[in-house]
Image (tube, rainbow, N blue to C red):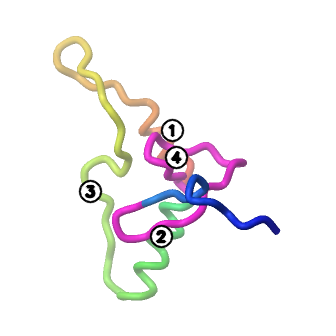
Amino acid sequence: MADPTNEDRSEGNEISGYKNPLLPASEWGWHPVGLRITLNWLYHKYQIPLFIVENGLGAVDTLEEESLVHDPYRIDYLSGM
């Protein structure tokens, strides 16, 4: 098995890992299944309820007409959990 390089890393605020080239990822390198795994790991470690705040997906949003953000990409991402 080849050693992963730094380019293969997906960095996070607290936890980082290796990118999986077979899975689609957000602009920041995260995949919804990875989010679920991380939430499960944190819950089992601390045994406290966890909540996704804000929108659960960091993305560069664009304001559309009437100052609304249409974000089907966020819905698709979270549906993948």
**Does dot 4 land on a helix, a strand or a loop?**
helix
Q: Magenta stretch?
A: 12-33
Q: Are marks 2 and 4 in contact (CB under 8 Å)?
A: no
Tags 4 and 3 in contact by the CB under 8 Å rule?
Answer: no
Q: Position of residue 12 (x, y in %)?
A: 40, 61
Task: Report crowding for label 1: few under 14, some 14 to 19, many 20 or more residues within 10 A (C-alpha).
Answer: few
For badge 2, the amino acid type reads Thr
User: Alpha carbon of mark 2 to alpha carbon of mark 4: how far?
Assistant: 16 Å
Q: Is residue 13 magenta?
A: yes
Q: Which residue is depicted at the point 23% across and 11% down? A: 65
Residue matched to label 4: 79
Nearer to the camera, 54 or 9: 9
Judging from the image, what secondary structure is the residue with disc 2 in? helix
Q: Residues within 10 Å of mark 4 (few under 14, many from 20)?
A: few
For this view, does 14 lie left or right of residue 81? left
Determine the CA span between mark 1 and mark 2: 19 Å
Q: Residue at x 44, y 39 (%)?
A: 75
Predominant SS of the magenta segment: loop
Residue found at the very far left of the displayed protein:
67
| Image quarter (top left, top right, bottom left or bottom right) of the N terminus | bottom right
At x 48%, y 61%, the residue is 35
Mark 3, residue position: 53
Indicate the position of residue 24 as horizontal and vertical percent values: 61, 43
